[in-house]
Image: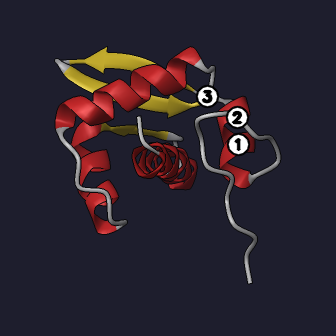
Amino acid sequence: MNSFERLLNEDRRLVILRLLAEDPGYRLNVYVLRPSLEAMGHTVSHDKIETDLAWLAEQGLVTVEHASCVTVGKLTPRGADVAAGRVTTPGVKRPEPEA
């Protein structure tokens, strides 16, 4: 994996965590995540989002549920810490400080 691809992966994973953190229930399905990621500059396939959710689940940052054949990601407390920059995790970009 080249450094640009690694940067895209890390940023996309951070964006997913931040989107989940913004939802009142801390959970979103892939059909909501896909256009939200696209609005943030990440045009990716449905499969890529599911792969990212599975990877984030392996790191303990989200849980993954399947409801009526729809994949739903839910933020964990550790994932919320990573999204806010209180904790770092290799493979997820650290948020930039707010101006």
Type of the residue with mark 1: Val
- Residue 61 marker: 3
Q: Residue at x 75, y 70 (%)?
A: 97
- Residue 43 marker: none
Whether tag 2 and tag 1 are in contact, CB under 8 A, the answer is: yes
What kind of element bears circle 2? loop
Inter-mark Cα distance, 2 to 1: 7 Å
Q: Residue at x 23, y 56 (%)?
A: 35
Query: Considering only order in the chain, which callout, 1 or 3, is on the residue closer to the N terminus?
Result: 3
Residue placed most toward the observer, 43 or 36: 43
Whether tag 3 and tag 1 are in contact, CB under 8 A, the answer is: yes
Q: Residue at x 47, y 43 (%)?
A: 6
Inter-mark Cα distance, 2 to 3: 9 Å
What kind of element bears circle 1? helix
Residue under numbered circle 2: 89
Query: Considering only order in the chain, which callout, 1 or 2, is on the residue closer to the N terminus?
Result: 1
Type of the residue with mark 3: Leu
Q: Position of residue 7 (x, y in %)?
A: 49, 50
